[in-house]
Amino acid sequence: MNLRHVLMSQLLAMVVGCLAIAKDVEPEPTVAEEEPLTPEAQATVDELRRLLPADSEGIAMLDNILTGSRLSAEDGWFPLAKAQTRFDWNYIRERYDADTDQVIKATEFPGSADDFARLDRNDDKQITETDLDWSKHSLTTTPGFMMFFMADRDANGKVTKDEFAALYEQLNKGEEAFLAIDDLREQFLPSPPTKLENRPDKPSRSTLIAGLKNQEVGSLQAGPSLDELAPDFTLKTIHGETVTLSKEIGHKPIVLIFGNFTCGPFRSQSGNIEKLYNRYKDRAKLLLVYVREAHPSDGWWMISNQKAGIVHSQPKDNAQRLAIASTCQSHLDLKIPFLVDEIDDRVGSVYSGMPNRLYLIDQDGKIAFKNGRGPFGFHPRQLEQALVLLLDSKK
């Protein structure tokens, strides 16, 4: 098997593990071909239908699972849970576009050059509506996306010089002291359709229903909406310090980042999270809330996690969750403060933080930005744009 197929196999394992199925994957079996639900799963279906409102995100996801869906970005609750922000293009245009030409130039933006650069997503030295277009989900495959996973050998979301050097050696056949264009181009040719039916980690409907009830697939609640007061909570850091959200409000904007170690997309974003923390730790309060595992070894386990040596069962008590959270922070080498949710998932549930999510809270304690459901809506750069604009609005 050549490198391209190895890469695509690894990417597919990661993407499937995050509830995403690539477009070049053959359709899954129809409902008629699916195995029947276990008695436990059927009892869970009946229970969820009794407990959840008929128009809730949870019921939308349950119905989609029962059809045999593999939960793509447009299935289940994902279309219902898009990003919410105060700082859309209309906000920017009305605030900064002095000459009304639909372009914000650096001379029209009162903030710093660094802040302007973070808004100017495509680096064309101006801000347009395109810079705020986040319609493509965060697992959309591009050549850069693929190259990142080729290089990130320890699955910590950060590619080092040594990892890039190792990738160079892997791509180079040893014949020349350089890479030619075809050496790279051939790695990103379309792969033939891949069948998933025989994957050992392919989840059954019963497994997904259990994950939905346990909130491993995601929180059954929708989380607070734009401009609502952020629900208060008190949690401890991995070092035992107590943090109460309401006591932090009023000083600086607050960024809440929800995630867990067994969620591949969360790990892949750890470099972006660390850069976000380093850029804004003096201007905002950034906190990572560690929540329930998305792919525990005793639930919907993943081959990609096993290959990375990230194998953990679902914690049964606070001490076990603390231990995995500490391992996660060490493995990902994150400096951002880690808060550890209680084993009853009180914060992750209320904020709809499983498997990953982003919130921006203003100085009045209200939600100024909320990303779409993870993993597809998990865009740290989108939150960063909202944070820049919130900071500028308070000047």
Image (tube, helix red, strand yellow):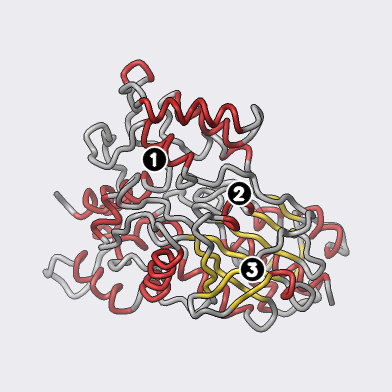
| Mark 1 / mark 2, whichever is N-terminal | 1
When the figure is inspected, residue 241 is found, relative to residue 307, above or below; the finding is below
Amino acid type indicated by mark 1:
Ala
The answer to which of 236 and 11 lies nearer the viewer is 236
Pick the front one: 333 or 376: 333
Q: Is residue 82 left or right of residue 202?
A: right
The residue carrying pointer 3 sits among few (fewer than 14), some (14 to 19) or many (20 or more) residues within 10 Å by Cα, namely some
Q: Is residue 377 above or below residue 184?
A: above
Residue situated in front as seen by the camera: 69 or 389: 69
- Residue at image mark 2: 372
Specify which label sits upstream in the sequence, 2 or 3. Answer: 3
Q: Position of residue 276 (x, y in %)?
A: 57, 73
Q: Which mark is residue 22?
A: 1
> What amino acid is labelled 2 in the image?
Gly
Percent of width and height locating residue 141: 42, 49
**Residue 234 disc label:** 3
Dot 1: element: loop
Name the element at disc 3.
strand
User: Which label number is shown at residue 67?
Assistant: none
Residue at the top extreme, as displayed? 32
* x, y percent for residue 114: 66, 78
Point 27% across, 42% down: residue: 201
- Estimate the spatial distance between the alpha carbons at disc 2 and disc 3, rounded to whole Å: 24 Å
